[in-house]
Image (cartoon, rainbow, N blue to C red):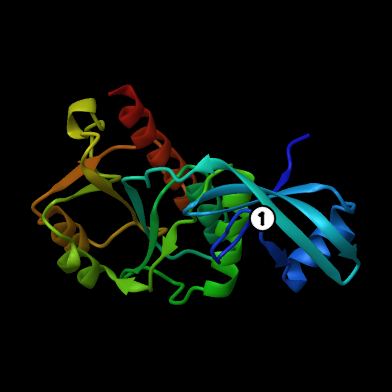
Amino acid sequence: MSNIRLYHLGRISENTTYLLSKEHTHYVANVMRLKRGSNINFFNKDGEWVSEIIFLEKDRVEVKFLNKVKETSKSSNIELAICLVKKNPMELILQKATELGVSKIIPIISERTEIKELNYERANKIVIESIEQSNQLTPPLISEVIGLNDFINNLKDKTKLLFADVNSKDNLRQQDLKPKDFHTILIGPEGDFSPSERELILGYSNVIPFCLSKNILRSDTAVISAISLVNFINNSH
């Protein structure tokens, strides 16, 4: 059985000790019921280390960091720009986008977006749990909620905008993507973008509109499909 993995914000050094947070203490002692001498892996953007529990009570757990078992890895070149949706599908989007390896999640408000806010505390908890589960090191950055106009206007020309457009009949092709390019996938709201918003998006100098499916997809399904497609093409190079 693999060691449990916990995200650690601070610096990790071999042969130093660390007192677990209240949340991690409860998880280790009361949920997982680990014992003194058990191993736990801690990770962050700098790598992953194995540790040993040297003190354990129900309200206090202390570990000693032993050795580094994984080096830092290159961050993904895929970002997700997603129009906000209701709580349950939004949480699924955060989870699956993280599992599929995006480096950043950009929540967007468009004309037809019903939800205007994001619970950042809950959102960050979801992406941390997803990183722990998916054997990655760095959780995606969740940026501030931004309006579609500002999002488009703030894009840098070198960013390739991959627009999942329900009106497009073109498939995303291997020649559309280059491994060194930075890609931002744009997924619209339930009910799609308005005609004026589509015009704004298609007016961006480095946009590639593409068709995901002949069917109308829910936002969460579209996110999973689009990221999986881009990952597949990237891995084919």
Q: Determine whether 71 is above or below 186 in the image.
A: above
- Which residue: 41% across, 49% down? 102
Q: Is residue 11 visible?
A: yes
**Image quarter (top left, top right, bottom left or bottom right) of the C terminus:** top left
Q: How many C-alpha atoms fall within 10 Å of the one at disc 1: few (<14), some, or many (≥20)?
A: few
How many discs mark residues in the rendered view? Answer: 1
**Image quarter (top left, top right, bottom left or bottom right) of the N terminus:** top right
Front-lying residue, 26 or 188: 26
Extreme residue toward the front, this view? 15
Q: Position of residue 211 (x, y in %)?
A: 29, 37
Q: Is residue 119 visible?
A: no
- Which residue: 80% across, 60% down? 27
Q: Secondary structure at mark 1?
A: loop
Front-lying residue, 179 or 81: 179
Q: Determine whether 8 is above or below 135 in the image.
A: below
Front-lying residue, 78 or 30: 30
Q: Determine whether 34 is above or below 208 in the image.
A: below
Q: Position of residue 20 (x, y in %)?
A: 73, 67
Extreme residue toward the top, this view? 236
Q: Position of residue 188 (x, y in %)?
A: 34, 56
Q: Position of residue 174 (x, y in %)?
A: 23, 26
Left or right of residue 63, residue 196 in this image: left
Residue under numbered circle 1? 15
Task: Give the residue type that dot 1 points to.
Answer: Asn
Residue 203's quadrant in the figure? bottom left
